[in-house]
Amino acid sequence: MHPSEKKCSGFFGIIPALLFLVVTGLCSCASTPWESSPPGGAAPSAPASTPAMPISYDFPDIQIPAELELVSGDSYVFQGTKTKAGLLVFKGRVEARSVLDFFQVSMPRENWQFKGGFRYKKSVLVFEKPERICLINVHEGPFYTYVEVYVTPMGSQF
């Protein structure tokens, strides 16, 4: 060994190994999408949590998953004498696929008719009511999934 090189040993040699074990142990204790059964195969006595109820913001007939939060700085709503229109922007740590599935189920419940859309890197769903159109744009960013909900009147409804 060259005299200028120092050998890590003792306490300082163990720190990286301990850090690795602690991080690995914490990750393995994190919750998983499934629950393990108690010994004997009995079912858990109570559910872990109840799903959060969807929320409506400025448009009561458009439900938004509770896991998404409004990005008010990027959203705007126009209120006229006869109609309301605008863009609501949301973000959350959810999968885009689950958001798309949510809207495809919830919008028809509110009497929106599915007109079409496309999926892949950015996905768009188009819904229609007799007096309005709703376009929902979903895309995943590096940390969040973003949802843009555009609502506009049809024809001369302003």
Image (tube, rainbow, N blue to C red):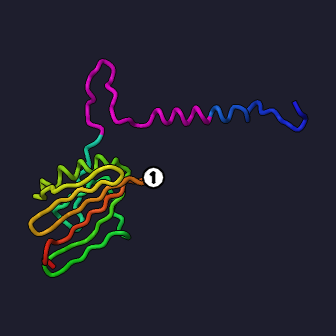
Q: Residue at x 25, y 45 (%)?
A: 51
Instruction: Indicate the quadrant containing the C terminus: top left, top right, bottom left or bottom right.
Output: bottom left
User: Relative to residue 92, is residue 156 drawn left or right?
Assistant: left
User: Relative to residue 111, is residue 119 drawn left or right?
Assistant: right
In the image, 63 versus 133, the foreground residue is 133
For label 1, the SS is loop
User: Relative to residue 123, is residue 140 drawn left or right?
Assistant: right
In the image, 17 versus 108, the foreground residue is 108
> Whole-percent x and y of residue 2?
89, 33
Q: Residue at x 69, y 31 (%)?
A: 14
Q: Quadrant of residue 35?
A: top left
Most distant residue in the bottom direction:
81
In the image, 75 versus 22, the foreground residue is 75
In the image, 61 versus 128, the foreground residue is 128
> Whole-percent x and y of residue 74?
36, 69
> Whole-percent x and y of residue 15?
67, 35
Most distant residue in the right direction:
3
> Whole-percent x and y of residue 122?
34, 54
Q: Residue at x 30, y 46 (%)?
A: 97
Residue 32 within the magenta-colored segment of the rendering = yes
The residue at which mark 1 appears reads as: 142
Magenta-drawn segment: 19-48
Up-down relation of residue 49 to residue 106 (above or below): above
Up-down relation of residue 62 to residue 24 (above or below): below
Q: Residue at x 38, y 52 (%)?
A: 140
Up-down relation of residue 28 to residue 127 (above or below): above
Q: Quadrant of residue 22?
A: top right
Q: Main secondary structure of the magenta part?
A: loop
Residue 56 within the magenta-colored segment of the rendering = no
Kind of residue at badge 1: Pro
Other-residue count near label 1 (Cα within 10 Å), few / some / many at <14 / 14–19 / ≥20: few
